[in-house]
């Protein structure tokens, strides 16, 4: 399924390094948004991931752009998504995302932690209870 929507919650957020490198030049529409799941911080890699379980709220942004067909292959590479769960660091799936500015629920691409690796994440990751990566970063300083 092709969509013009991408939900991000971590290093691709506006103002962070990967947004500057991979997203900003395409000038997508940007909306505050949220999705369901549980956010974890992986200390050894210093970034967040989301496991698609639980009713937690993941805070992020929704990018809307017709350029997504160009952006996604680059993002798949940096997120190490191969299309095969067992060979991917993260997986990319279509999820329901709430646009917090309009109240509308839309379908969007979202990078998630593979369910097959959930046990490792639960043992080695740190839960970010409020699902807000930027706030977590600020509190780490």
Image (tube, rainbow, N blue to C red):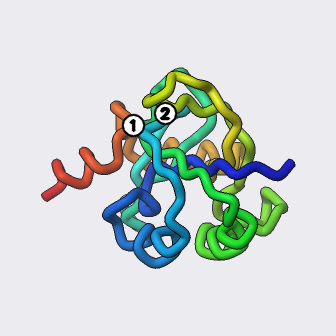
Position of 94 with respect to 137 (left or right) is: right
Position of 62 with respect to 139 (left or right) is: right
Q: Secondary structure at mark 1?
A: loop
Residue sitting farthest toward the left: 141
Viewer-closest of 127 and 19? 19
Q: Is residue 132 visible?
A: yes
Residue wearing tag 2: 34
Residue wearing tag 1: 131
Mark 2 burial class by Cα count in 10 Å: few <14, some 14-19, many 20+: many
Quadrant of the frame with the C terminus = bottom left
**x and y, in percent, of residue 64 in the image:** 60, 51
Q: Is residue 48 above or below residue 67?
A: above
**x and y, in percent, of residue 17 in the image:** 37, 72
Q: Please report contact status of discs 1 and 2: CB closer than 8 Å, yes or no.
A: yes
Say which residue appears at 63% left-offset and 57% top-offset: 65
Q: What is the CA distance from the residue labelled 1 to the residue labelled 2?
A: 9 Å
Say which residue appears at 65% left-offset and 69% top-offset: 71
Say which residue appears at 50% left-offset and 65% top-offset: 27
Q: Is residue 36 visible?
A: no
Viewer-closest of 110 and 88? 110
Going from the N terminus, do you reach mark 1 or mark 2 first? Answer: 2
Q: Secondary structure at mark 2?
A: strand
Tell us which disc is closer to us: 1 or 2. Answer: 2
Q: Is residue 50 above or below residue 46?
A: above
Instruction: Name the quadrant containing residue 79.
Output: bottom right
**x and y, in percent, of residue 8 in the image:** 51, 51
């Amino acid at each position: 399924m092709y969509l013009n929507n991408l939900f991000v919650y971590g290093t691709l957020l506006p103002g962070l390094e990967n947004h500057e490198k991979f997203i900003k030049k395409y000038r997508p529409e940007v909306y505050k948004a949220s999705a369901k799941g549980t956010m974890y911080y992986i200390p050894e890699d210093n970034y967040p991931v989301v496991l698609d379980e639980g009713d937690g709220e993941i805070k992020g942004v929704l990018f809307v752009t017709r350029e997504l067909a160009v952006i996604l292959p680059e993002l798949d590479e940096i997120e190490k998504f191969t299309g095969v769960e067992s060979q991917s660091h993260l997986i990319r799936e279509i999820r329901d995302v709430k646009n917090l500015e309009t109240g509308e629920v839309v379908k969007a691409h979202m990078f998630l932690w593979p369910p097959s690796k959930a046990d490792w994440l639960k043992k080695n990751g740190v839960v970010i209870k409020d699902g807000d990566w930027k706030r977590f970063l600020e509190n780490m300083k």
